[in-house]
Image: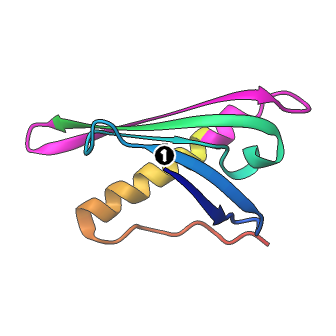
Amino acid sequence: MTTSAITSSGKPGTTSSEAWPPGKLLRLTGAIGPLQEAALVGTMTWTLLQAGSGTTVELSYTVGGFRAGGFRDMPTVVDGVLRGQLARLKAFVETGRPGRPLPERE
């Protein structure tokens, strides 16, 4: 499935998704956030694993391509964003509330 959406920057973006096996894996392909402005592509994989009476979520995001200035600063920034998203997802699943929202950009 391919979806088109308006990104947070107000520009159109496209992401393709695949879920196989259903309920256990979701894979999204496309650049997210600040990666959209460079010649990059990323693949994000969400894997759901049974863990006792609960579920463990594994998230990986692999990026490749060209970015002027290189990638030195990007892993830390992207990792922080993804960790925040996972923390909000965990809070939502456990409490019904996603936790503190991110501050709005100016």
Task: Report the magenta residues as a range.
Answer: 51-78
Question: How far from the left and from the top, in percent, is residue 63?
Answer: 65, 30
Residue furthest to the right: 68
Rendering quarter of residue 12: bottom right
**Residue at image coords 28%, 71%:** 96
Please state which of residues 97 and 34 is positioned toward the viewer in this rendering: 34
Residue 23 vertical placement versus 94 (above, below): above
Three-letter code for the amino acid on which mark 1 is drawn: Ser
**Residue at image coords 24%, 61%:** 94
Question: How far from the left and from the top, in percent, is residue 41?
Answer: 69, 35
Question: How far from the left and from the top, in percent, is residue 18?
Answer: 43, 42
Left or right, 49 with respect to 97, comes to: left
Which residue corresponds to mark 1? Answer: 17
Rendering quarter of residue 90: bottom left
Residue 50 vertical placement versus 1 (above, below): above
Tally of numbered discs = 1
The verdict on residue 64 being magenta is yes
